[in-house]
Image (cartoon, helix red, strand yellow):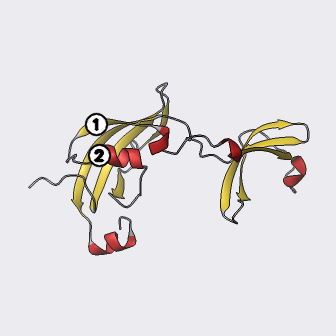
């Protein structure tokens, strides 16, 4: 019996992720395949949906729109703040990442996008927010998840 990708299955796959311009954003090709528990929200929703029904050795392309990937860009997460907020940091440059406290006390990653005098623009959106993602996938293995994996919500 051929096992198919579906809920409570452990799937192992190789993938290459590119943006709309064909730039490689991530790939498992030079490392171990990615293993995840299907249906446990271990990977982005659009990719998970695109893999349903696939079997070992299947190769496919899955295009994921921002709303099924890392979301649309949320303008409220882009803010200009005073340089003084970065106490103890000598030099601030675009591309630097920091952890900040969000409005509800949660930890939020922000990236500096611009430094203009004493004003620093930070972006709290995921780096791939607003980006259409293209995955080239090869399914390496599919197996039933163990009861413990299902209970814990991830592969062991």
On the rendered image, what quadrant is the N terminus found in?
bottom left
* Gap between marks 2 and 1 measured at Cα: 8 Å
**Left or right side of 123 for 12:** left
Name the element at disc 1. Answer: strand
Q: Residue at x 26, y 46 (%)?
A: 139
Residue drawn at x 22%, y 60% is: 143
The part of the image, by quadrant, that contains residue 27 is top left
Left or right: 66 in relation to 127: left
- The total number of labels drawn is 2
Pick out the residue farthest to the left: 1
| Quarter occupied by the C terminus | bottom left
Residue toward you, 139 or 29 = 139
The residue wearing badge 2 is: 51
The tag on residue 60 is 1
Left/right placement of residue 106 relative to residue 130 reads right
Does residue 89 sit above or below 67 in this rendering?
below
């Amino acid at each position: 019996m051929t096992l198919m990708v579906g809920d409570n299955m452990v799937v192992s796959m190789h993938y290459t992720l590119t943006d709309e311009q064909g730039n490689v954003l991530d790939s498992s090709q030079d490392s171990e395949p990615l293993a995840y528990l299907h249906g446990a929200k271990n990977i982005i929703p659009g990719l998970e949906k695109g893999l349903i029904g696939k079997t070992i050795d299947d190769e496919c392309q899955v295009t994921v729109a921002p709303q099924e990937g890392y979301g649309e860009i949320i303008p409220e997460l882009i803010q200009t703040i005073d340089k003084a907020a970065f106490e103890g940091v000598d030099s601030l440059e675009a591309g630097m990442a920091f952890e900040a406290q969000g409005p509800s006390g949660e930890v939020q990653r922000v990236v500096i996008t611009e430094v203009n005098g004493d004003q620093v623009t930070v972006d709290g959106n995921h780096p791939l927010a607003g980006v259409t993602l293209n995955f080239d996938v090869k399914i390496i293995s599919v197996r039933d998840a163990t009861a413990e994996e299902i209970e814990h919500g991830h592969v062991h």
